[in-house]
Every structure is written in C-alpha cells, then in structure tokens.
Image: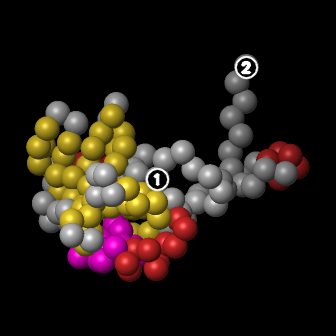
C-alpha cells in the first residue's frame, strides 16, 4: 500500500514538517551581460573590492573564481574571464542564479525551451540570443551559463 501525503495533511504538521517546502532564493538575477553584482566590463579591482576574500585570482589563465557560499566550497559559484584586468565573460555554475524568467543552472532543458527561443551552437550548448547567454547541458540539465 502506498501513502501519499499532501501538503495540507495534518500529519505533516504533527511530524514537524512544513506544509510547503522551503525554496532557496536566488542569489542573483542573470541579465544580459551581468550576474547580479558582476558585469562585463567590470575591473578586476572592483571584483576584488566587491568579493574581497571570496574571489580567487589565477594569473596563469586570467580567471577569477568567486565563492559566494559560507565556508569552504569545492566549486566556484562564478568564474570570471579577465582580459587586461577587465571582466570579459562570466561563467555561472551556482543554482542560486536565475534569469528573470527563473531559469539557471540545475534546471532542465525543457524549462529553458519553454521560456526562450534556443539556437543550438554545439551538441550540449544552446544560445538565447536575446540574453546573449549560452546554456551548457549535461543529461538535459543546465550545468552552467556563459555570459559574454
């Protein structure tokens, strides 16, 4: 026998489970050329001032990785490509960033296709021309968004 608990079930409140699951708020909105507080054209000094110790610069490959979460993280939330100490591209990995339509890393290909017109640029890459963003996929899930 299967038991299905609906969100209005009194049993949930007796068990101390909230009726509606908590959803994490986006850390930032992805817009054309920007990921919340970072934008293309921003200087490396401004990135350092904005993120202080949460930004790790790598001079070998001209990138800055930004870690927004508390504590240690294995993977960056953002990776910034720098040319002449200016941000020229932003790679977004964190599921906390979403477009204004609510799509970002961790979401499905279908959710992206339902909201935007896609142009495939490679097997696992679709571009949304209006946003100037490329969405990279793995197993029909967005794994990162490239703003350039």
Residue 9's place in the image compared with 2, above or below, is below
Left or right of 50 in this view: 119? left
- The circle drawn on residue 145 is none
Left or right of 104 in this view: 53? right
- The C terminus is located in which quarter? bottom left
The image shows residue 19 at horizontal and vertical percentages of 72, 55
The residue pinned by badge 1 equals 76
User: In the rendered structure, which segment of residues is drawn in magenta?
Assistant: 30-44
Left or right of 120 in this view: 13? right
The image shows residue 85 at horizontal and vertical percentages of 27, 71
Task: Mark yes or no: residue 44 visible.
Answer: yes
- The N terminus is located in which quarter? top right
The image shows residue 44 at horizontal and vertical percentages of 34, 73
For the point 17% across and 33% down, the residue is 123
Q: 52 or 3, which is in the foreground?
A: 52
For the point 37% across and 56% down, the residue is 58
Task: Mark yes or no: residue 116 visible.
Answer: no
- The circle drawn on residue 1 is 2
């Amino acid at each position: 026998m299967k038991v299905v608990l609906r969100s209005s079930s009194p049993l949930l409140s007796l068990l101390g489970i909230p009726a509606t699951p908590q959803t994490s708020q986006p850390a930032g909105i992805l817009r054309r050329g920007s990921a919340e507080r970072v934008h293309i054209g921003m200087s490396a000094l401004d990135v350092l001032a904005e993120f202080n110790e949460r930004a790790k610069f790598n001079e070998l490959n001209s990138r800055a990785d930004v870690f927004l979460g508390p504590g240690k993280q294995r993977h960056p939330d953002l990776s910034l490509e720098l040319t002449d100490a200016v941000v020229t591209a932003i790679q977004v990995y964190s599921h906390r960033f979403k477009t204004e339509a609510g799509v970002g890393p961790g979401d499905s290909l279908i959710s992206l296709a339902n909201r935007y017109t896609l142009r495939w640029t490679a097997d696992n890459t679709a571009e949304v021309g209006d946003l100037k963003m490329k969405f990279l996929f793995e197993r029909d899930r967005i794994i990162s968004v490239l703003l350039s």
